[in-house]
């Protein structure tokens, strides 16, 4: 639908509308609004995606860690497919990657953790004293763990996308590893891409020890 000229918003205003969208379904709806909105999208797709991702993706910074790990994995694979992608295709692949990851980790939480919290609450337990079981914290930690699983797959330990992991993150990751071994099935861990990492307890413990030293003493001390 084309809008008469005197009703059209300036492109700068339309861009701001895009950038304040809460999800990509809204972005898609805006793209289809008119030819003007479509042109603004074509000219500013990258900045729009960067602005909307933190709104659309729960635990965005942790999700970004996983996406960076996946991009590094793709770089290691040195695929011709990636080198031949257009700018538009790169943006589409990026958004799909974030959304696919989000669906996986959020679905795992909903099917495995939410029933546990409901049951514990019904039994009178104070779930506020179980911070790792809270949605945002669990999902963020699961993103970190999936990124670490890729590091384990390629046997690298000093990775920039893991360098921001701090003391509290490590504590949560250690608790999550224990939880997976006690509660989750091998099939579910494999589905999440974590089984090989959780089986390799020596590598996992060495990485956590080195990261702890790097945090508390300094990166050189961990080498």
Image (spheres, rainbow, N blue to C red):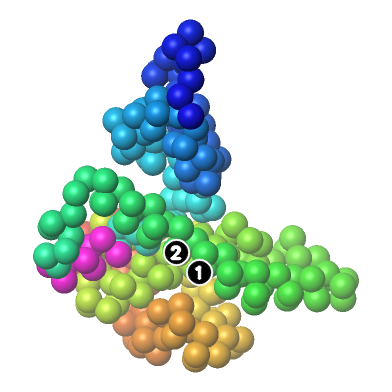
Label 2 sits on a secondary structure element that is: helix
x and y percentages locating residue 169 in the rendered image: 48, 61
Q: Is residue 112 above or below residue 49?
A: below
Residue at image position (47%, 43%) is 28
Residue at image position (52%, 40%) is 29
Residue 36 versus residue 135: which sits nearer the camera?
36
x and y percentages locating residue 196 in the rendered image: 36, 86
Q: Is residue 154 above or below residue 28?
A: below
Q: Is residue 177 left or right of residue 149?
A: right
Tell me the residue that label 1 is attached to.
104
Label 1 sits on a secondary structure element that is: helix
Tell me the residue that label 2 is attached to.
101
| Magenta stretch holds residue 75 | yes
Residue 206 versus residue 76: which sits nearer the camera?
76
x and y percentages locating residue 160 in the rendered image: 26, 56
Q: Is residue 91 above or below residue 200?
A: above
Task: Find residue 5 and report its image quarter.
Answer: top left
Q: Magenta residues: mostly which secondary structure?
A: helix
Q: Which residues are magenta?
A: 70-78
Instruction: Evaluate whether residue 69 shows in this view.
Output: yes
Do callouts 1 and 2 mark residues in contact (Cβ within 8 Å)? yes
Q: Is residue 137 left or right of residue 155?
A: right
Q: Is residue 207 left or right of residue 77?
A: right
x and y percentages locating residue 54 in the rendered image: 47, 43
Task: Find residue 175 and report its image quarter.
Answer: bottom right
Residue 135 versus residue 28: which sits nearer the camera?
28
| Magenta stretch holds residue 177 | no
Residue at image position (30%, 63%) is 69
Distance CA(mark 1)–CA(mark 2): 5 Å
Q: Considering the image in quadrants, where does the C terminus appear?
A: bottom left
The residue carrying pointer 2 sits among few (fewer than 14), some (14 to 19) or many (20 or more) residues within 10 Å by Cα, namely some
């Amino acid at each position: 639908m084309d809008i008469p000229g005197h009703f059209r918003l300036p492109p700068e205003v339309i861009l701001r509308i895009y950038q304040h969208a809460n999800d990509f379904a809204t972005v898609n709806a805006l793209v289809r609004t008119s030819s003007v909105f479509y042109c603004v999208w074509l000219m500013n797709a990258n900045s729009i995606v960067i602005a909307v991702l933190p709104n659309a993706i729960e635990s965005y910074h942790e999700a970004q860690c996983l996406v960076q790990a996946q991009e590094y994995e793709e770089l290691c694979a040195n695929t011709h497919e990636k080198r031949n992608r257009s700018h538009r295709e790169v943006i589409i692949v990026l958004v799909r990657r974030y959304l696919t990851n989000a669906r996986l980790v959020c679905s795992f939480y909903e099917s495995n953790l939410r029933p546990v919290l409901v049951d514990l609450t019904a039994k009178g337990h104070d779930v506020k004293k179980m911070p790792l079981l809270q949605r945002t914290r669990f999902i963020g930690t699961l993103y970190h763990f999936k990124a670490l699983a890729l590091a384990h797959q390629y046997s690298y330990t000093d990775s920039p996308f893991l360098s921001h992991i701090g003391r509290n993150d490590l504590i949560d990751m250690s608790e999550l590893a224990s939880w997976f071994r006690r509660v989750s099935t091998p099939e579910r861990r494999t589905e999440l891409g974590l089984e090989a990492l959780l089986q390799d307890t020596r590598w996992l413990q060495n990485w956590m020890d080195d990261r702890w030293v790097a945090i508390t003493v300094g990166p050189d001390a961990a080498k």
